[in-house]
Amino acid sequence: MRARAAARTTAGPAAELVLTGDLDRPARLTVPDLLVWPRHRAEVAFECATSGIQHHTFTGPLLHDVLMDAGPAFDPARRKDRLRFLIAVRGADGHHTLLSWAEMDPDFGRAPVLLAATLDGTPLDLVGAQLVLPQDRCGARYISGIDATRVDDGYAAWT
Ligand SMILES: Nc1nc2c(c(=O)[nH]1)N[C@H]1C(S)=C(S)[C@@H](COP(=O)(O)O)O[C@H]1N2
Ligand SMILES: [Mo]
């Protein structure tokens, strides 16, 4: 334990993201932990209101694969059951966004949303994972340095 703590101090603290909300298996994941899921690659272009068009290559698991393994509180066999769910993604600086579950669900919007572990070939181990939405024209939802992701029944507040 002592040796490990010392190694971490020299390398800087590894970024971690917490998966919380309506999940059977909430988790804490480092960026290297993301490599256990099948790895996807996305070559993307997005526009930033302040810095113009950017081109990047990201690799990492599908957000859908990671969240399915955390056991969201719906019956996976019933498609309608998933439609109420929302995903909140937050960066360590507080920048955040909401996605609907259906947006990335293979039975609905099928957006290949990634939880990227590398950016242009560089591992994101120290900064944290980045949200990648190849379908977005604007870069604002490409949240970097993710420290928390929450899955919730977004309809519960109405009923
Ligand atoms: N954590 C975090 N991620 C963020 C932002 C931010 O302010 N904080 N800005 C977004 C915006 S507006 C854009 S265009 C992209 C690219 O930002 P960059 O130009 O800083 O790389 O990152 C997105 N991800
Ligand atoms: Mo931006």
Image: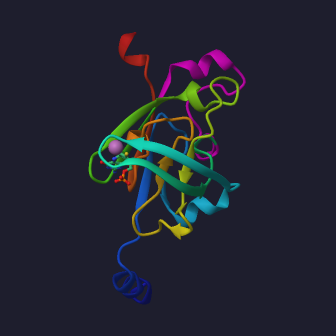
Would you say residue 17 is visible in this rendering? Answer: yes
Asked where in the image residue 156 lies, by quadrant, the reply is: top left
Q: Decide if residue 158 is on the left or right side of residue 65.
A: left
On the image, the x and y values in percent for residue 130 come to: 46, 53
Q: How is the image coloured?
A: rainbow
Q: Decide if residue 110 is on the left or right side of residue 51.
A: right
Residue furthest to the front in view is 52
Would you say residue 70 is visible in this rendering? Answer: no
Asked where in the image residue 33 lies, by quadrant, the reply is: bottom right
Front one among 138 and 128: 138
Ligand 2: quadrant of the figure: top left
Question: Against 107, is 97 above or below?
Answer: below
Query: Magenta includes 154?
Result: no
Question: Against 127, is 19 above or below?
Answer: above
Q: Residue at x 60, y 18 (%)?
A: 81
Front one among 93 and 41: 41
Which quadrant, please, contains the N terminus? bottom left
Front one among 59 and 33: 59
On the image, the x and y values in percent for residue 5 come to: 38, 82
Q: Residue at x 59, y 39 (%)?
A: 71
On the image, the x and y values in percent for residue 35 come to: 63, 62
Magenta stretch bounds: 65-86
On the image, the x and y values in percent for residue 117 come to: 54, 60
